[in-house]
Amino acid sequence: MPNIAVLTNDLQYEFIDKMPGGRELLSRVAPQFNMFLGAIRALGHVVVHLQLINDPNDPQIQRRFRGKEIPAIKGTPNAELIKDFVHPSDLVMVKGRDSGFYETPLDDKLKELGVKTVLVTGIQTQICVQTTAADAFFRGYKVWVPEDCVFSLKEEDKKRSLEWMASYCAAIAPGAEIIKRLRQGDDLPSREELLG
């Protein structure tokens, strides 16, 4: 059973297209990010894509967007996961809020698989990545964030979020370092173990 699960957040056309230069960013980071995901799969661990789908009839979603166009609605082409990142062995889980754990079966599925450690990746470091990482920590998972596999509209938002997670709930490291550690053992230390 896998000890590790990569949780991707919002790797959807809708959100890439909203980022300034998003398509260029995608073409630049996709090869390295796919190498990371491929190495995780080759080591026998699992990749779970968390796909944000907003319900336009949800009062909280209506309040959040206040008359603006609601993104990522079920059935719209832009709400689909970016095909470049999805492998047939991956799991896909729909979420209706920023955190992948909020009112989803994610925790139950990870426990069923024997996962002890999550690697949280994806779009909007300071929103979906951060809330998913914090929720994983609250549930007792060891949390790592590969700093080169998370993205934000503004670099300062990403930096601030990584600093917050490093101070509270997650170990932060480059993806290559995480893969190197996993090739030496079947799990990763907790943030607290790293800090001594």
Image (tube, rainbow, N blue to C red):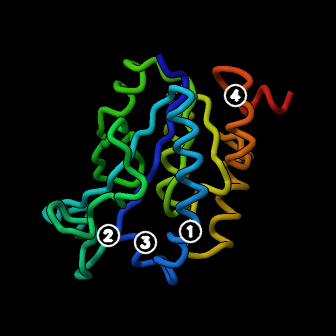
> Which of the two discs, 4 and 1, sits closer to the camera?
4
Q: Observer-nearest residue: 129 or 17?
A: 17
Indicate which disc residue 16 carries: 3
Residue at point 69% right, 63% down?
160
Query: How many labels, in total?
Result: 4
Marks 4 and 2, Cα distance to the nearest angstrom?
Answer: 43 Å
Q: Name the residue under label 2.
A: 64
Q: Position of residue 180 (x, y in %)?
A: 74, 35
The amino acid on which the numbered mark 3 sits, given as a three-letter code, is: Ile
Q: Observer-nearest residue: 43 or 94?
A: 43
Upstream in the sequence, badge 3 or badge 1? 3
The vertical placement of 85 against 65, above or below, is: above
Marks 4 and 3, Cα distance to the nearest angstrom?
Answer: 31 Å
Circle 3 crowding by C-alpha within 10 Å: few under 14, some 14–19, many from 20: many
Marks 3 and 2, Cα distance to the nearest angstrom?
Answer: 20 Å
Marks 4 and 1, Cα distance to the nearest angstrom?
Answer: 29 Å
SS of the residue under disc 3: helix
Q: Mark 4 points at which residue?
A: 183
Upstream in the sequence, badge 3 or badge 2? 3
Residue at point 22% right, 81% down?
67
Q: In which quarter of the image is residue 14?
A: bottom left
Residue at point 25% right, 73% down?
70
The vertical placement of 145 against 18, above or below, is: above
Q: Name the residue under label 1.
A: 152
Circle 2 crowding by C-alpha within 10 Å: few under 14, some 14–19, many from 20: few
The amino acid on which the numbered mark 4 sits, given as a three-letter code, is: Arg
